[in-house]
Image (spheres, grey):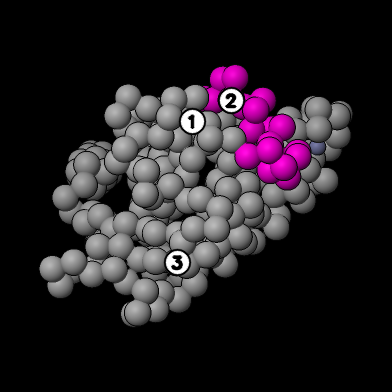
Amino acid sequence: MKCKLCLKNKKLIKAHIIPKSFYKPLMEDKEIPLIVTDKVGMYRSKMRIGVYDSELVCEECERIFTSWDNYANEFFNQKLLDENFIIFENKNIAYNFGKCDYKKLKLFFLSMLWRASVSKERMFTRVKLGKYEERIKKIMLNNLEEDSDEFSLAIIKFDNMNVRGFLDPDRTKYEKVNHYRFYLGEYMAVIKVSSLSDPKCFQELYIKENKDVICTFRDFRKSKEYNVMKLVSKKSWKNSNK
Ligand SMILES: [Zn+2]
């Protein structure tokens, strides 16, 4: 089968799209949580840890992703220190992660976006990059030698984890600019995919080289995503009791 990255005819392997480590905070007593998906008829399927696809890449190409995946794993599983929280009116509103390995973090998110776009898995049907698929592929193969403003990245942390699950990644517009959203356990990654300039609401939040990584908090209960999840959970309840 043809590898989607090197385009050679090779034996393809089970390639992860979302690394396993992101599911860890959602595990309880080593129980695999249910995957919450917002597609009809798929409500109660068991979460497959680190959604994978066997028709994506060869072993050699998967190895390109490994160091980026490992870095993202380290980054998102680091212990949050009290002194780095940004407080406003007695509430934690953001966290300053300090400097990051910008290259690795950006390549991780771009590669995840690319993997999701190339994949035929149902979970990723809303991720369709079109012409940007090829652009991201080039950036990955060049190891980000040429960075691009077409792709900017911000991370948001949900501060209430009563609702557990993953929503399917989707596309949305912030100030008319296209973004993809990935729901990664406690975090949401927002990736701009557009040649338009950065929307104002994200200007200070996009991760930039040599700048501190500021992650804002959002109360899950008040967010739109939470409402979707709640609705989905209710529906799935009904479905399983039929
Ligand atoms: Zn390959």
Question: What is the residue that sits farthest to the bottom in this orientation?
Answer: 82
Q: Position of residue 61 (x, y in %)?
A: 78, 43
**Residue lying at 41% horizontally and 74% vertically, measured from the top left:** 80
Name the mark on residue 97.
3
> To which residue does mark 1 refer?
193
Give the crowd class for mark 1: few <14, some 14-19, many >=20 residues within 10 Å: many
Discs 1, 2 touching: Cβ within 8 Å: yes
Q: Amino acid at mark 3?
A: Phe
Q: Amino acid at mark 2?
A: Tyr
> To which residue does mark 2 refer?
132
Name the mark on residue 96.
none
Q: Where ligand 1 lies, by image quadrant? A: top right
Give the crowd class for mark 2: few <14, some 14-19, many >=20 residues within 10 Å: some
- Compare marks 2 and 3 and give the one earlier in the sequence: 3
Choose mark 2 or mark 3, whichever is in front: 3
Q: Position of residue 159 (x, y in %)?
A: 27, 62
> Which is more toward the observer, 57 or 204?
204
**Quarter of image, res 117:** top right
- Compare marks 1 and 3 and give the one earlier in the sequence: 3
> Which is more toward the observer, 5 or 98?
98
Q: Position of residue 150 (x, y in %)?
A: 52, 31
Quadrant in the picture for the C terminus:
top left
In this picture, which residue range is highlighted in magenta?
A: 127-147
> Which is more toward the observer, 9 or 241?
9
**Residue lying at 37% horizontally and 58% vertically, measured from the top left:** 215
Query: Disc 1 and disc 2: Cα gap in Å?
Result: 8 Å
Query: Disc 2 and disc 3: Cα gap in Å?
Result: 29 Å
Q: Is mark 1 within 8 Å of ligand 1?
A: no
